[in-house]
Image: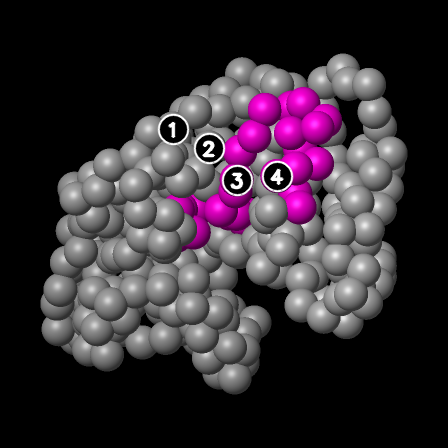
């Protein structure tokens, strides 16, 4: 069964009890993506990684890369940690990737107790690749290779992969409270996304141009998100009602610097968040392009 190796970043820095809770939340959020898409998967974990086993690796890759907390994902080939088996599998795995005169690097890492170091494994595999196809005139380039081959030894299993697909990073949804966000255009959509990335569950209030941005992109990152559509002129009243109903911790507004004082006065004691406050319109557009690329 095809396997994805899933990496996560910031949450690994938390204390052990908090980290365990964050990891459980991350796993639930991955399962929610698959359930919403009508797909199935099997999850397992070791210290620092998750593994997603699925029948459709392409679809799984699209789903997993939308999950907050995930920093990167790699489709991997899995083999037992036996040196001869690793050598044999690396040769067959690398053959279609290494074209004549291409440069390559083997990046080896290991955890656990083994009879070889990471550097020794990389040198051994590199030498065998070079000897396997002398007619291809391959070269080793550790700085800027045409092809990178990753060999990650984790206890009794070894994982081979050649690329990393970026995820959104941040913290898993649901570990940092709830906010109500106005999405009436790209600035509001980027602001909502950035709050989601910090682990907040975001109630999305879609108005005007924001309706399409919520439906086509933001709900892909949180298929369980609550979405309320409203007219732009009715948005403040709608948001105040939702804050009370959901017991939200604050409101997320698409403000620029000169708009903040009047917004602060209008919202009274309500906690205001505006992650895009210092962004120019051009910076907002760049961020939104990055977000839509992640959404797939």
Q: State whether residue 245 is above or below residue 258.
A: above
For residue 43, the mark is 1
Q: Quadrant of the N terminus?
A: top left
Q: Earlier in the sequence, mark 3 or mark 1?
A: 1
Alpha-carbon span between mark 1 and mark 2: 6 Å
How crowded pointer 2 is (Cα within 10 Å; few <14, some 14-19, many 20+) is rated as: many
Q: Earlier in the sequence, mark 3 or mark 4?
A: 3
For residue 77, the mark is 3
Alpha-carbon span between mark 3 and mark 4: 9 Å
* Residue topped by disc 2: 51
Look at the numbered disc 1 and give the secondary structure of its residue: strand
Alpha-carbon span between mark 1 and mark 4: 24 Å
Please tell me which residue lies in front, 84 or 276: 84
Q: Earlier in the sequence, mark 3 or mark 2?
A: 2
The magenta segment is 63-91
Q: State whether residue 275 is above or below residue 225.
A: below
Residue appearing at x 84%, y 63% in the figure: 139
Q: State whether residue 271 is above or below residue 187.
A: above
Q: Nearer the viewer, mark 3 or mark 2?
A: 3
* Residue topped by disc 4: 89
How crowded pointer 4 is (Cα within 10 Å; few <14, some 14-19, many 20+) is rated as: some
Instruction: Tell me if residue 202 can be seen.
Output: no
Q: Nearer the viewer, mark 3 or mark 1?
A: 3
Look at the numbered disc 2 and give the secondary structure of its residue: strand
In the rendered image, the residue lying farthest to the bottom is: 282
Q: Nearer the viewer, mark 3 or mark 4?
A: 4
CB under 8 Å between callouts 1 and 2?
Answer: yes
Please tell me which residue lies in front, 37 or 162: 162
Q: Is residue 146 left or right of residue 30?
A: right
In the rendered image, the residue lying farthest to the front is: 135
Q: Earlier in the sequence, mark 2 or mark 4?
A: 2
């Amino acid at each position: 069964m095809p396997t994805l190796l899933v990496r996560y970043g910031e949450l690994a820095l938390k204390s052990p009890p908090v980290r365990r809770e964050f990891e459980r939340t991350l796993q639930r959020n991955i399962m929610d993506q698959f359930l919403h898409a009508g797909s199935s998967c099997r999850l397992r974990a070791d210290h620092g990684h998750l593994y997603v086993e699925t029948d459709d690796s392409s679809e799984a890759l699209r789903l997993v890369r939308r999950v907050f907390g995930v920093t990167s994902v790699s489709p991997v080939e899995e083999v037992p940690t036996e040196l001869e088996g690793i050598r044999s599998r690396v040769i067959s795995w690398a053959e279609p990737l290494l074209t004549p005169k291409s440069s390559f690097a083997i990046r080896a890492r290991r955890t656990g107790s083994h009879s070889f170091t990471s550097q020794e494994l990389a040198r051994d595999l590199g030498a065998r690749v070079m000897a396997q196809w002398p007619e291809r005139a391959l070269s080793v380039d550790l700085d800027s290779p045409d092809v990178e081959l990753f060999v990650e030894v984790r206890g009794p299993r070894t994982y081979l992969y050649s690329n990393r697909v970026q995820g959104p990073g941040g913290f898993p949804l649901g570990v940092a409270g709830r906010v109500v966000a106005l999405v009436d255009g790209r600035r509001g959509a980027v602001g909502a996304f950035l709050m989601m990335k910090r682990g907040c569950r975001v109630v999305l209030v879609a108005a005007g141009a924001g309706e399409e941005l919520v439906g086509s992109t933001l709900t892909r990152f949180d298929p369980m998100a609550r979405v309320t559509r409203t007219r732009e002129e009715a948005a403040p009243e709608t948001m105040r009602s939702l804050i009370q109903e959901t017991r939200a911790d604050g409101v997320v507004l698409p403000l620029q610097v000169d708009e903040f004082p009047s917004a602060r006065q209008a919202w009274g004691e309500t906690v205001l968040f505006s992650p895009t406050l210092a962004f120019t319109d051009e910076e907002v557009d760049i961020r939104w392009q990055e977000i839509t690329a992640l959404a797939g």
